Amino acid sequence: MMRNAVLPRELNSMIAPERKDFAVKAGRAQPRKKAWALIIFGLFWTGFTSIFVFAFLGPLFVGKEVHFESNGVPVVAGPGNLGEILVPALIIGFFVIIGIGMLLGGLYSMFRKGGYYVGTPLRLVHYYKGTMRSIDWEQFSGDITVSGNMDTGSVSLQMRTGRMVSRKDGPDRYVPDVIYMSRIPNAFEIEKICRKRIKENDPTPPNS
């Protein structure tokens, strides 16, 4: 028999009138592979832009001048004349900060806890650090991914909402929003419950 997690008192009071299909505490906010993808891309981006930092600004670090062209005009910048190089340095620094931001975001996602998930006959409730999000089952498309073993696993629920992502080498692609319940107990049992509730609350009429 599946045992429900002990919920915070505030969450219990919020959903008290409803019957709980399941109540679990997620070990992570997202699957580890998504965090790794962001970390690796952040490292690549930061490393690539750092090449420009050292190639363009490197001589200044050792007290030498930098020679470059601006609008076709030769420009010399040095330790005593940094005004000419200020704008290019800010542009390069902006891209370096983007890479560092992605790297830090990936590290944060790697260790961020997932909070509590509670399923009721009508909705899925997510509770994390005093903030509750309630999603009706009809908002999910029914496309579910489950992984792990009989003790611990992860469940990913695709939603009907999403966004269009543009691509250089092809047409725009629709990316649905996804709710992740990562590193939870009884993942396969919970997947069956979610699938059942999504079908029961499906807003689309059945085919005749």
Image (tube, rainbow, N blue to C red):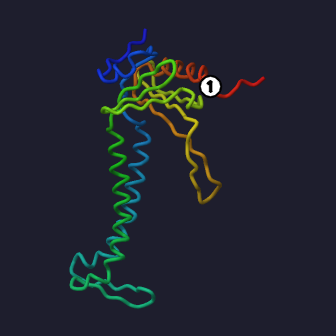
Closest to the observer, 84 or 45:
84
Within 10 Å of disc 1 (Cα), the crowding (few <14, some 14-19, many 20+) is some
Q: Is residue 30 left or right of residue 200?
A: left
Q: Residue 46, located in which quarter of the rendered image?
A: bottom left
Q: Which residue lies furthest to the right in this view?
A: 208
Closest to the observer, 196 or 107:
196
Q: Position of residue 85 (x, y in %)?
A: 32, 80
* Residue at 33% over, 45% down: 107
Q: Residue furthest bottom?
A: 73
Q: Position of residue 7 (x, y in %)?
A: 32, 20
Q: Is residue 20 above or below residue 108?
A: above
* Residue at 41% over, 23% down: 152
Q: Quadrant of the C terminus?
A: top right
* Residue at 38% over, 85% down: 68
Q: Is residue 179 left or right of residue 24?
A: right
Residue that badge 1 annotates: 202
Amino acid on which disc 1 is placed: Asp
Q: Which residue lies furthest to the top in this view?
A: 1
